[in-house]
Amino acid sequence: MIARFAGFLYFLLIPLGVFGIIYVPSTLIVDGDITSTVSNIASNESLFRLSIAAALLAQLVNIAVVLFLYKILAPVSKTAARVMVLFSLLAVPIAMFNELNNGAVLLLLDDAGQSLAQVSLFLNLHEYGIQIAGIFFGLWLFPMGYLVFKSTFIPKVIGILLIIASIGYLADSFIFFLNPGFEPVISEFTFVGEAAMTFWLLIVGVNAKKWRERALESTTIKTV
């Protein structure tokens, strides 16, 4: 039951992330044309505000997801599970505070004397903030992948795919800072691990018998 609820929460991140981080920016922001971008945002302010709300809600869901995953994966290794939680929770405040940049864009739009350069600055800062948070969203997948791989109650291949997804997010973030003009997005090809983990938990759950065995084993080791 816990595994399926964790899968459901993880699944919620898909529409929230796609809407807030991908769909709205791709719809309203025109690369290299700040005048059209400002016009689009001003004409679709409600949509822009919804994207901010979706991004913030996604972070609240992220907190719940990692806490439920901790409960599921801690019997494998509490140390690795704690590292997973740490990396995920470090990303949350970065991502949430980053939405202040979009809030600043809205404030500038309300100012009749707003500067296009200022709007461009905050939109760019928002993109940088996403990439900084992306470092930690990549890092938390590595211990999760390790835990899944070492577990006996979730398929090992999902653990491998999660580690690959971790590398993809990290590569995207660091490539962005080294070469912002680099077009290919590696995580678009390596996200499969997260999707596999989400749908496995949501549809299949975990092998309850093997999970109980690992939980009992970890308890026994602790008391010896």
Image (spheres, rainbow, N blue to C red):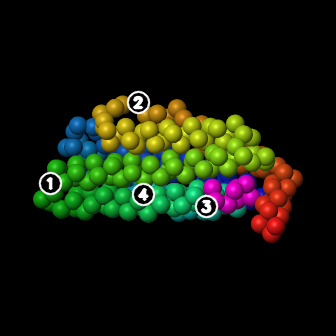
Residue at mark 3 to residue at mark 4: CA–CA distance: 20 Å
Residue at mark 3 to residue at mark 2: CA–CA distance: 33 Å
| Residue 21 appears in the figure | yes
Question: Callout 3: 10 Å neighbours few (<14), some, many (20+)?
Answer: some
**Front label number (1 vs 2):** 2
**Of label 1 and label 3, which has the lower sequence position?**
3
Q: Position of residue 1 (x, y in %)?
A: 78, 58
Q: Amino acid at mark 4?
A: Ala
Quadrant assignment, res 67: bottom right
Where disc 2 sits, the SS reads loop
Q: Do labels 3 and 4 touch, CB within 8 Å?
A: no
Where disc 1 sits, the SS reads loop
Residue that badge 4 annotates: 95
**Of label 1 and label 2, which has the lower sequence position?**
1
Q: Residue at x 21, y 59 (%)?
A: 108
Residue that badge 1 annotates: 115
Q: Residue at x 43, y 53 (%)?
A: 133
Q: Say which mark, if any, is on residue 131.
A: none
Relative horizontal placement of residue 119, taking residue 65 as reference (left or right)? left
- Image height of 30 relative to 135, above or below: above
Q: Write the start and end of the magenta stretch as one range.
A: 73-80
Q: Amino acid at mark 2?
A: Pro
Residue that badge 2 annotates: 184
Q: Position of residue 124 (x, y in %)?
A: 28, 48
Residue that badge 3 annotates: 82
Residue at mark 2 to residue at mark 4: CA–CA distance: 23 Å
